């Protein structure tokens, strides 16, 4: 165990790295149009600023356990902080788009390794009976980062310039590096892996997970499997992941020890975290789009709809962190699921007249519920993990959370697109010359344009038809968003069977596990 006398200071130190990395996953999204203007790039080119970061994240996550053991966790973590900070400087100062994308790849590799190592350091710093508190602190970065990222990015871009979304990492990174050097210690059981490095495992995981991220990030844009481009990446992902799993179970010294998935609590916890990431990030992305596209909110106002949920999560995590080990873990997780289901159920009543208070209330429900999910799921998942496998376990755990987020965003966008087209076609089919509602709407619109706009009857009729069609499109998108919220609600229902595989009182069981 590390220096537990400074455990809260160590928690703050590792949280800085986690927060920086997760914020940078989403902070650049709102600045893409400004970057495109700087480099004279098109939409397909500039979105590689996001895709490259996500691909690098996915590739490195399962390898962080091996990296920590090979180089020593303190040395590896500090190296990641230094590289991430320098890559942030390089991203802001990049003279061309290819260099910016290269810097984002470096950022993604360093940041992707940094998060699971942060989690491992915190689990090793706090005694097992206090893992609930540790994961509540770690959850501040994991939950609050993606909430504040777009709002922070928008504010910085509007008030300064887009390079500053990367430059702000520099002072934070320097503080984290200095504190980490002073405080973090390697546990005694960290040992350099014996034998030759299994480069094939790295090649296969890079091919599989990198291709999967490209597939998920670009699938909707290219109409999924209708595109040869997407089919290529789908085959590459399937082949790479299959070979990676095969190699992990057959190699003499694999980079990733997948045998930890045989642990029932860990397998259940990673499955729950995958589905939680799915529902969480799907709603994170969809709700601001709904607010901006249909309700006319500014990006800042849409961010303010989301942000209160983050503060609710913080309150809940602090509260739940003290309950882990005292109350049955399954009760806590089930409570969190119910809060999220209620939140999404409320959103299914959204309309074009939904006000700010209604939307914010739904997010408060979800945010509070997430606090009941993240902490107990994480503590329960690591209850029976041997200390020397903590690094491997945190890497896979964070990988499943990230992949759940990617799948959730991709499928939510697909449901939105397909259902809006379905509702559009259905509404259009009901607009016939014999429709009383259509005749009444066209008459009212034509009368308005003829009287107030001074148009002639023919032009008034055309303007009225345009107005009716625009309303039809808005209604079809509204119904599609409601379908997405129903879809995400079902995802949270799918969490329930996995709850029964968790340990009853994870914290107490963990405290009794020999270290």
Image (cartoon, rainbow, N blue to C red):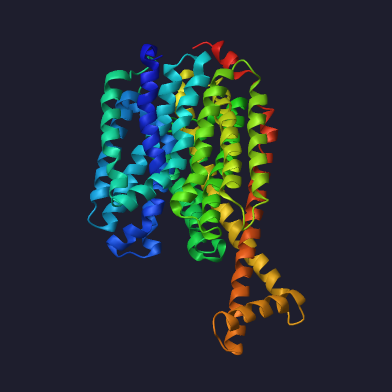
Q: Position of residue 156 (x, y in %)?
A: 33, 48
Which residue lies at the image location 39% right of the left edge and 35% below the top edge? Answer: 19
Is the residue 89 above or below the residue 478 in the image?
above
Marks counted in the figure total 0
Nearer-the-camera pick, 228 or 34: 34
Q: Position of residue 473 (x, y in %)?
A: 61, 68
Among the 4 quarters of the image, the one containing residue 76: top left
Q: Position of residue 80 (x, y in %)?
A: 31, 34
- Residue 193, visible in the rendered structure: no
Among the 4 quarters of the image, the one containing residue 445: bottom right
Is the residue 421 above or below the residue 250 in the image?
below
Which residue lies at the image location 42% right of the left edge and 47% below the top edge? Answer: 150
Q: Is residue 376 left or right of residue 490?
A: left
Which residue lies at the image location 61% right of the left edge and 25% below the top edge? Answer: 265
Nearer-the-camera pick, 396 or 19: 19
Nearer-the-camera pick, 420 or 112: 420
Is the residue 463 above or below the residue 51 in the image?
below
- Residue 396, visible in the rendered structure: yes
- The residue furthest front is 451
Q: Position of residue 403 (x, y in %)?
A: 51, 43
In the rendered image, the quadrant that contains the N terminus is top left
């Amino acid at each position: 165990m590390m220096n537990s006398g400074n455990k809260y200071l160590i928690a703050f130190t590792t949280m800085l790295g986690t927060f920086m990395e997760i914020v940078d996953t989403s902070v650049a999204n709102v600045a893409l149009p400004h970057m495109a203007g700087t480099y004279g790039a098109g939409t397909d080119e500039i979105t590689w600023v996001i895709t490259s970061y996500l691909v690098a994240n996915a590739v490195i996550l399962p390898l962080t356990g091996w990296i920590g053991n090979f180089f020593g966790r303190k040395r590896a973590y500090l190296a990641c902080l230094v590289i991430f900070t320098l890559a942030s400087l390089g991203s802001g100062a990049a003279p061309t788009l290819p260099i910016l994308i290269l810097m984002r790849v470096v950022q993604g590799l360093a940041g992707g390794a940094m998060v699971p190592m942060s989690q491992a350091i915190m689990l090793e710093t706090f005694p097992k009976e206090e893992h609930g508190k540790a994961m509540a602190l770690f959850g501040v970065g994991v939950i609050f980062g993606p909430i504040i990222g777009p709002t922070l990015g928008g504010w910085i871009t509007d008030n300064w310039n887009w390079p500053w979304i990367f430059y702000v990492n520099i002072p934070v990174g320097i503080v984290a590096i200095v504190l980490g050097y002073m405080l973090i210690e390697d546990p005694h059981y960290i040992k350099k892996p014996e034998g030759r490095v299994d480069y094939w495992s790295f090649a296969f995981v890079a091919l599989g997970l990198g291709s999967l991220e490209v597939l998920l990030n670009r699938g909707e844009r290219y109409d999924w499997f209708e595109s040869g481009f997407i089919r290529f990446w789908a085959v590459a992902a399937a082949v790479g992941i299959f070979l990676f799993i095969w190699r992990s179970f057959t190699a003499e010294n694999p980079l990733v020890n997948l045998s930890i998935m045989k642990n029932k609590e860990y397998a259940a916890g990673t499955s729950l975290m995958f589905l939680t990431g799915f529902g969480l990030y799907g709603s994170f992305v969809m709700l601001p789009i709904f607010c901006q596209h249909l309700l006319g909110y500014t990006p800042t106002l849409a961010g303010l709809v989301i942000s209160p949920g983050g503060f609710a999560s913080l309150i809940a995590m602090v509260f739940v962190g003290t309950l882990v080990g005292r109350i049955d873990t399954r009760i806590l997780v089930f409570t969190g699921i119910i809060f999220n289901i209620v939140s999404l159920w409320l959103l299914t009543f959204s309309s074009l007249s939904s006000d700010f208070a209604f939307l914010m209330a739904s997010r408060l429900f979800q945010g509070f519920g997430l606090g009941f999910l993240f902490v107990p799921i994480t503590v329960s998942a690591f209850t029976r993990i041997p200390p020397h496998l903590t690094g491997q376990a945190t890497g896979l755990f964070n990988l499943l959370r990230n992949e759940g987020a990617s799948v959730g965003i991709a499928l939510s966008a697909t449901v939105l697109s397909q259902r809006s087209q379905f509702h559009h076609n259905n509404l259009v089919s009901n607009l016939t010359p014999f429709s009383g509602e259509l005749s009444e709407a066209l008459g009212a619109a034509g009368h308005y344009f003829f009287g107030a706009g001074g148009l002639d009857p023919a032009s008034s009729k055309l303007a009225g038809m345009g107005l009716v069609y625009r309303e039809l499109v808005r209604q079809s998108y509204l119904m599609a968003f409601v379908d997405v919220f129903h879809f995400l609600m079902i995802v949270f229902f799918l969490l329930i069977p996995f709850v029964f595989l968790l340990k009853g009182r994870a914290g107490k069981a963990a405290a009794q596990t020999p270290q």
